[in-house]
Amino acid sequence: MTDLRTELGEAVGAAFAAEGVDPALARVTPSDRPDLADFQSNGALAAAKALKANPRELAGKVAARLEGDPRLASVEIAGPGFINLKIADAATFPASSRGLA
């Protein structure tokens, strides 16, 4: 069974790849600021540096690709390009209950 963090990492990785960015940079971790988000991805900062792009713009493009994901209540950009992910209440149920297993 895949855990939620892994599922989100795969989704963020796919969004990074769709923007031409190495999906390995899309690592999802528990948020350093649980008051702001459940999970975060800081990969847009490193990716933008490698691409010589604006990290906040890149994070915005990645976030736009994640909009509508039923596991996420919100996707927000903070600071220079941090991607904050708040999980939807339904995402806390086991994958089998969500029809994903």
Image (tube, rainbow, N blue to C red):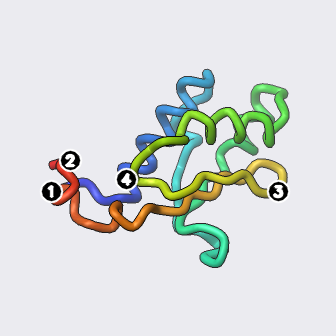
The residues bearing labels 3 and 4 have C-alpha atoms spaced at a distance of: 24 Å
Q: Where is residue 17 in the image (x, y as percent from the top left)?
A: 54, 27
Q: Residue at x 44, y 41 (%)?
A: 11
User: Relative to 74, is 23 above or below?
Assistant: above
Query: Which mark's residue is nearer the viewer, 3 or 4?
Result: 3
**The N terminus lies in quadrant:** bottom left
Name the residue nearer the viewer: 13 or 100. Answer: 100
Instruction: Look at label 1 and name its amino acid.
Output: Ser
Q: Position of residue 78 (x, y in %)?
A: 76, 57
Q: Is mark 1 on a helix, strand or loop?
A: helix
The residues bearing labels 4 and 2 have C-alpha atoms spaced at a distance of: 13 Å
Name the residue nearer the viewer: 39 or 46. Answer: 39
Looking at the image, residue 50 sits to the left or right of residue 93; the answer is right
Instruction: Look at label 4 and name its amino acid.
Output: Thr
Which residue lies under the disc numbered 1? Answer: 96
Which residue lies under the disc numbered 4? Answer: 6
Q: Which mark is residue 79?
A: 3
The residues bearing labels 1 and 2 have C-alpha atoms spaced at a distance of: 6 Å
Number of dots carrying numbers: 4
